[in-house]
Each structure stands twice: as structure tokens, then as C-alpha cells.
Image: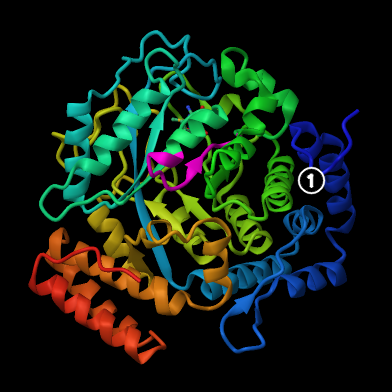
Amino acid sequence: MAIYNPKSLKAEEFINDEEIRATLEYAEQNKNNFELIDSILEKARPVKNPDGNGCTCKGLTHREASVLLACENPEKIKKMYEVAEEIKLAFYGNRIVLFAPLYLSNYCVNGCLYCPYHLKNKHIPRKKLTQEEVRDEVIALQDLGHKRLAIEAGEDPVNNPIEYILECINTIYSVHHKNGDIRRVNVNIAATTVENYRKLKEAGIGTYILFQETYNKESYEYLHPTGPKHNYAYHTEAMDRAMEGGIDDVGLGVLFGLESYKYEFAGLIMHAEHLEAVHGVGPHTISVPRVKPADDIDPDEFDNSISDEMFTKIAACIRIAVPYTGMIVSTRENEQVRAKMLKVGVSQVSGGSRTSVGGYAGYSPDERPHDTEQFDVSDQRSLDEVIHWLIDNGQVPSFCTACYREGRTGDRFMSLCKNGQILNCCHPNALMTLTEYLVDYASPETKEAGFRLIEEELKRIPKDKVREITAQHIEDIKNSNSRDFRF
Ligand code: SAM
């Protein structure tokens, strides 16, 4: 039997079934131990650094975090939400980073039971973008105002080999339409080899994202009955290979609804602990997708669906357990759920998303093709509506992509978070990239609300010099075609 060891490179040792079950038992036994819960929350809170610059957070172990998740006391849950928000504001401020998915191909050789792209689905049209079509999609995305994409593809060594993915990345970065630019391409493709991860790194990708789907090996094998994705160890160990290939920023996630959420949560935090133990840096992001209706897929077939309340609590507990990790919520969730998630620590959202292959170019904002779609999108608002909504919610929408372009990846990004330089760095970058959006793409109403917000937020930049330079660049963006200023 595998023995739990967070430093091991073997999937069943760092995501250890026995340890997860013991954790869930411990959490159940202690869910009403309010003294313990208070001490866990106290440990998790941000503490000011001795030099007065920034804060530090200790984070939580998977056992501690699981106790919080198990607790059902409304007062303690309220406290969890407060601590989650406090952590979010300490490290990420009130900024929310925007991105959009770009589906390259829905050819897939896997048999995932929850995904419409599964091989046996014979009625979904299969489509793979040509480089000309990639260019058209990128122009359409740039015209919406996007600067950051997550590319998505099924797994198919013949139709979507790594060379195809690399060619698409190259094309995406090469398109500069009007003042548009895609400055960060995150990649969500199937688990692959160290050599291929190295190629992705060389192509200049941002984060490599791979959802675990479920950490429960038995369920994993059941849900992925055929194809290369069936191999639990190969999939679970992918992030270690990505890091060996030089990718510092990796994004974790589980598809909530497939397995018991408590099991998934413990597995997710253990995965983060493992990355920290082996590579000295935790995950750059954690995504929290929930399984959605799709062609040939009925989410009711999976009997682990979670309520919106539980979903919000899971997000709060993730924020508390891994304070420096960005958290992503997609348009799988509707406006109401996304609003709740913003309060408990989400730092990135997608906007104006299309989940079909070729879903952007040639379609008006309220026209959406469904034929090759991966799942139903719940938040169908345009990017401009999402931006306006964020502003109305007191958030600063950010199109910043500076960190990885300035070499601040992995632990260098984490230290920026910890030493309190975010207000002198990320905040000005957010304001400058928001200005680009407002000048180049926004509706008059969003523009007005946005510039009002920028005026107020400029005052919060602590260093005089940084504030002056930021204000100057904002004027430059308004009065010329100069773009892409960054700290
Ligand atoms: N093919 C790659 C892989 O196997 O990891 C990744 C790309 S896939 C397009 C992106 C993610 O969509 C999957 O990892 C899965 O979690 C999610 N997904 C699949 N079917 C879904 C559904 N019905 N509802 C919500 N999300 C779904």
C-alpha cells in the first residue's frame, strides 16, 4: 500500500487515498471543535511584516483546511468568509484579472464521461482551427479588448500534436490588430512529456493549466474509461513534469460535481503542498469549474453536485489555505455566483467567453454558435458588461500581463505578493491596462465609470514617484497610441 509522502514524485504517495480518508475523518470529528476552528482561522490571517511592508500568511495544511470545510456553524462560516476576503485584499487587492478561453480543436481520443468531446460522441461536429482561423479569432478577441487567453484543445496526437499547439501560440502572439495584443497565452492541454512542456515554455506560454478532474483514483479511472487520459499517475504527475520542463506557473483545478467535494478539496490542497515541498513553489492558480450540461452530457448523471452555498464555501477555504495562489472562476457560473465568489477571494474571471471552436469571429455579441461547444456558458454577458459590473462592485478590472513578461514567475511572483509591493506594481499595471481597455474598446457608460474609478484608485498608490509615472502613462494612453506600459 502507498504511504503518504508529499515529497514523493509518485501520484499515489503525494495524493494518498488513505491520508485523504484519515483527513476527512479528522475533519468530521473536529467540525464542532470551535476552539480548534478559531485557532486555525487565527493562524490563517495575514500578519504585517516587521519592516512594515506587506503581510505574510502561513496558509493551512490539508487537515486544517478540511476541518474548516467540514464546519457547518453559520457564525464560523461567516468568519471564514471574512478571513478569505481579508487575505484576498492583502495579497491581490481589489483587482480582478480578465481572460478568455480560445478553443483550438475539439478532436479528442479520450473517453471522458463528462465531456462532449469524448471519442464516442459521433454527432458533435469536429473542428480544428486553421492558422487563418486562429488569426481571425485573435482579431475578434483583441477587438473585444482581451490581452490574455487560455487556449483549449482536446487530446489527439494526430489532429492536435504539440507542433499544432506551438504553431497556434506563435500565430496568436504574432497578431497585432489596431492597438490590440495578446500578451499572455495560458495553455490548457492534456498531460504531456517533459520535452513537450519544454517546447511550450520556449514558445512563451504563461500558465500551464491542467484540471485533475478528480483526485479519487477509482473514480478517475471510471470517468476516463478509454484513451491516454485513463492513466491516473501520468495525469496526476503532469505538473511535476511541467516544472521539470521549466514551466514555473502551473494551474490546478478539479471538476466539481464528479466526486465528493470534501475528497477533492483535500486532494487539491495536498497537490499544492506537494508542489511547494518538491519545487519550492505552489500552484500559480487554482480553478474551480463545476460540471455543466453539454451535448451528450447530463450533469445529473453525476450525483455529487454541490449547491451554490457550498461552492462559495469551498472557494473561501481554498483562499484561506493557499493565500498566494490566484483563483479562477469561469463563465460556467452565472452572475450571482460570480459575485459571491469575488467576495471570498477569486482573483481572475473570464468574460465574453465562447466555448466552441471558432466561436468569436463573425458573430455579434449576442449570437453564439452551439454546434462545437464544450459546455453551456451561464454568464452570457459581453466583456464590456462584465467590466462595468466589476467596476460597480468596487473591483478594478485588470488586463495586466506584466509579471511573467518581466520574469516574475514561480517564487519571484510569490515574493512580490509577500513583500507588499503589489500596490506599487500590480495596482498601477491594472490601472494602466484598464485605461487601454477604456480608451480602445469600452462603451461610453463603462468608459465613464472606469475613469471615475481610476481617478480614485490612483490615490492609493503609496510611492509618489510611481503614482506620478502611472498618471503620466495614463495620459499618454489617452492622448496617443502608446500602449503596454508596465512596472
Ligand atoms: N483536453 C485537455 C485535458 O484533457 O485536460 C484540456 C482541455 S478541456 C477542453 C478543459 C476542461 O474542461 C477539462 O479539463 C474539464 O475539466 C472541463 N470540462 C469538460 N467537460 C465539461 C463539462 N461538461 N462541464 C464543465 N466543464 C467541463
302 on left or right of 278: left
Q: Is residue 287 visible?
A: no
Q: Which quadrant would residue 440 be assigned to in this image?
A: bottom left
Query: Which residue sits furthest bottom?
Result: 464
* Coordinates of residue 175 in the picture (x, y in percent): 19, 42
Q: Is residue 397 visible?
A: yes
Q: Is residue 375 magenta?
A: no
Q: Which quadrant would residue 469 be assigned to in this image?
A: bottom left
* Coordinates of residue 260 in the picture (x, y in percent): 70, 37
Scheme of colours in the image? rainbow
83 on left or right of 397: right
Type of secondary structure dominating the magenta stretch: loop
Quadrant that contains the C terminus:
bottom left
Which residue: 38% across, 44% down?
204
Magenta region: 201-212
Is residue 391 depicted above or below 374 in this figure?
below
485 on left or right of 257: left
Quadrant that contains the N terminus:
top right
Is residue 3 depicted above or below 385 in this figure?
above
Type of amino acid at the residue the image marks with label 1: Pro
Which residue: 58% across, 72% down?
418
Exactly how many numbered labels are in the figure? 1
Q: Is residue 203 magenta?
A: yes
Q: Which quadrant would residue 127 be assigned to in this image?
A: top left
* Coordinates of residue 25 in the picture (x, y in percent): 88, 46
* Coordinates of residue 253 in the picture (x, y in percent): 57, 42
Q: Nearer the viewer, residue 332 or 119?
A: 119
Residue at label 1? Answer: 6
Which residue: 67% across, 55% down?
280
Q: Tell me the crowding category of disc 1: few under 14, some 14 to 19, or many 20 or more residues within 10 angstroms, Cα based.
A: many
Does dot 1 land on a helix, a strand or a loop?
loop
